[in-house]
């Protein structure tokens, strides 16, 4: 495989004249035409330029197909209503002693509650904890759905509005928009 052209070689080729200067040389009654050194160096660079163009085309093709794959995947997940694409590898199995911790009720700390006032991720986590509580109302659960939907759509205005809603009717309207 041909080696890549250096920046200096590319600069030299870029400065090459538009015309090739030829010199007529004679020796012992024979004459021939010789191109100047700039033409010879450009000719020597052609195989490396071709190799570089092929490499770049391959790279661009790979990037375009990757972009197309990601775009299709994003459309599929948007249609499915998923907030994030599914992880490519399975999560490791948690140790068995963590099961009892996961069954315990979540408690919202004062620090988490105050962080939820201006941090969307903290607000969503607090709302999850509230709506998973045994005594959670339908409003809390509906608020969680509306907030999650707004977050998935990237609509922070609807997200914060859903967080403040106190009735099911208004929350249902937010989830539809």
Image (spheres, grey):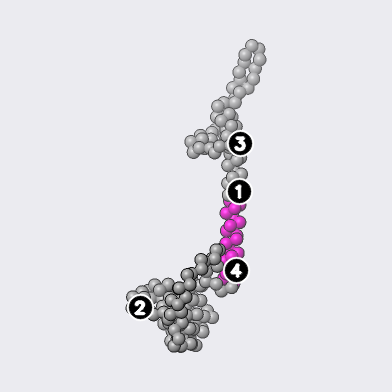
Choose top left, top right, bottom left or bottom right for residue 27.
top right
Of the image marks 1 and 4, the number of the one nearer the N terminus: 1
Work out whether 161 lies above or below 25: below
Binning the other alpha carbons within 10 Å of mark 4 as few (below 14), some (14 to 19) or many (20 upward) gives few
Report the mark closest to the observer, 2 or 3: 2
Give the residue number, with chain letter if any, for mark 2. Answer: 109
Q: Residue furthest right?
A: 30
Image quarter of the N terminus: top right
Seen from the viewer's position, the closer of residues 113 and 46 is 113
Distance from the alpha carbon under mark 1 to that under mark 4: 27 Å
In percent of width and height, residue 90 lies at 54, 65
Distance from the alpha carbon under mark 1 to that under mark 2: 53 Å
Binning the other alpha carbons within 10 Å of mark 3 as few (below 14), some (14 to 19) or many (20 upward) gives some
* In contact (CB < 8 Å): disc 4 and disc 3: no
Q: Visible in this render: residue 24?
A: yes
Seen from the viewer's position, the closer of residues 143 and 46 is 143
Report the mark closest to the observer, 4 or 2: 2
- Label 2 sits on a secondary structure element that is loop
18 magenta-colored: no
- Label 4 sits on a secondary structure element that is helix
**Residue at (61, 23) in percent of width and height:** 34
Seen from the viewer's position, the closer of residues 147 and 33 is 147
- Label 1 sits on a secondary structure element that is helix
Work out whether 98 lies above or below 15: below
Q: Visible in this render: residue 11?
A: no
In percent of width and height, residue 71 lies at 58, 63
Give the residue number, with chain letter if any, for mark 3. Answer: 47
Distance from the alpha carbon under mark 1 to that under mark 3: 17 Å
């Amino acid at each position: 495989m041909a080696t890549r052209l250096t920046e200096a070689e590319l600069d030299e080729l870029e400065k090459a004249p538009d015309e090739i200067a030829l010199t007529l040389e004679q020796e012992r009654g024979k004459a021939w035409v010789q191109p100047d050194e700039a033409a010879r160096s450009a000719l020597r660079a052609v195989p490396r330029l071709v190799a570089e163009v092929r490499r770049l085309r391959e790279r661009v093709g790979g990037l375009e197909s990757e972009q197309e794959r990601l775009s299709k995947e994003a459309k599929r997940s948007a249609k499915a209503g998923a907030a994030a694409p599914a992880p490519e590898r399975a999560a490791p199995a948690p140790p068995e002693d963590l099961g009892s911790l996961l069954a315990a009720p979540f408690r919202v700390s004062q620090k988490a509650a105050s962080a939820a006032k201006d941090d969307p991720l903290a607000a969503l986590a607090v709302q999850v904890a509230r709506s998973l509580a045994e005594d959670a109302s339908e409003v809390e659960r509906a608020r969680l759905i509306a907030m999650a939907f707004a977050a998935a759509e990237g609509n922070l205005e609807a997200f914060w509005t859903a967080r403040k809603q106190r009735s099911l009717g208004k929350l249902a309207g937010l989830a539809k928009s």
